[in-house]
Amino acid sequence: MFCPLLRTWSSAIIRKPPPVPGAALVMSSRSWLLRTGSKVSVVGWLDAVAQSMVRFRTGTNSRPFQYDTAIVAGSASAVKRATGIGGHRGRMRAWPKRKGEDVTMKLPVNPPVAPMLAKPVKQIPDGPYSFEPKWDGFRSIIFRDGADIEIGSRNERPMTRYFPELVDQAIAQLPPRCVIDGEIVVPDSGGVKLDFEALLQRIHPAASRVKLLAEQTPAHFVAFDLLALGDTDYTERPFAERRSALEEALAGVHTPLHLTPATTDRDLAQQWFSQFEGAGLDGLIVKPLDGIYEPDKRVMFKVKHERTADCVVAGYRTHKTSEEAIGSLLLGLYKDDGALASVGVVGALPMEQRRALFTELQPLVTTFEGHPWNWARPEGVVGTPREAEVSRWNAGKDLSFTPLRPERVVEVRYDHMEGPRFRHTAQFVRWRADREPRSCTYAQLEEPVSFDLAGILGSQAGS
């Protein structure tokens, strides 16, 4: 029996518009219209045979669909009657809406939406651009329709339950009907620098823990783009117009909601690039002033800090496709007390080099007895430098490693540090046979000049 609030999905071949009136695919996550002749990932609404509006969603991780493939929503019989197709590729399933999930939003742009992305460039470009700080947090889009709030993530999965304090603030401060793109961040206890590790801890399955962390490490939301306001869809409007409307819409907000600074002055942007890193920011985002909002497309630019460091190679993990190929090298730096600290990994290598390197490193393979990271060995299992046997994002992912004698040094490229570790995966530059492993210390790392986060947000970020 088909319940009006059940959501279903099916992958079906559609070579012409659905023959049943009212069974229309009206929205694409990239263009909001079903375009034939190009790859689209359709997010549609189908007025099912039961005359019930049923919401369908698909994530950015879905396989791209070719021009003659679309996703429709409804019961199995409704899909069949609406499309006129007797067979379907893939599976079909139905489930009640998740607890706390809204299915009644009627905004000009409804969730889910894949955020617009940026591609890396080496230098700050010249031209008609808007320059903004690059925030180091969780990319999020807030949808508000009256008392209904949904916080979407970069992969289009809702994060609403993890940030109840932001839900309350969105209701209290944002316009009654709006869709705003931004970043969720957590300042440190002093409110002077971003704390990404504290932000990571906010993603927790237990409701009691979520509530406690919302009080102990409250999150902030930094807005930087406008997708919809009232009944107006802004996604097809140039960024200069979207920014002006966003400034007006958020003129009265206060912490923990913020409007990101922006400038068209390249010289000032260069100054921000140097200064703001001291507050834990990640570089610059560059937006064409005439650019429309294009979900899931890399049409903006990002300029990130780039530095090099010489690190000790103290272990490796094998590649997911082969036990005889290197997946990643585990990197270390010596502390003042002589202990070798784990600082990150380097992993982007051609497969041919991965296989050759596996053979090359075998003479250095050792046991945990006497290894600097022998504390990583749990009973009966090979451990990891971070004292974790599984990934916090993928419980089934094996993070065990093979220890190596710390005798080789590699030069890597990195953007910035998060505490004692590289914030992102480092990039291989070259081997340093001329370097003594014990000379690879934290002293070589460039320390950004401290800069108060409150000076960027224009308010007490930690309050």
Image (cartoon, rainbow, N blue to C red):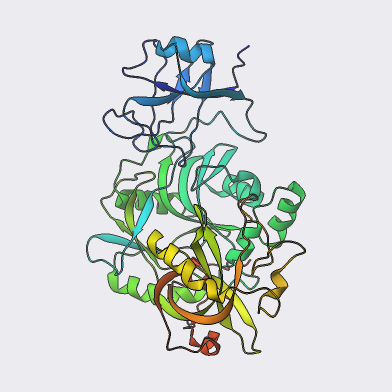
Q: Is residue 51 visible?
A: no
Quadrant where the C terminus sits is bottom right
- At 49% from the left and 30% from the top, the residue drawn is 106
- The correct choice, above or below, for 403 with respect to 57 in the image is below
In this picture, residue 389 sits left or right of residue 129: right
Nearer-the-camera pick, 219 or 388:
388
Nearer-the-camera pick, 325 or 282:
325
Q: Quadrant of residue 301?
A: bottom left
Picture coordinates of residue 114 (x, y %)? 44, 43
Q: Quadrant of residue 127?
A: bottom left
- At 54% from the left and 86% from the top, the residue drawn is 441
Picture coordinates of residue 358 (x, y %)? 48, 66
In this picture, residue 415 sits left or right of residue 302: right
In the current view of this chain or complex, which residue is farthest to the left?
A: 127
In this picture, residue 239 sits left or right of residue 54: left
Q: How many marks?
A: 0
Picture coordinates of residue 333 (x, y %)? 56, 81
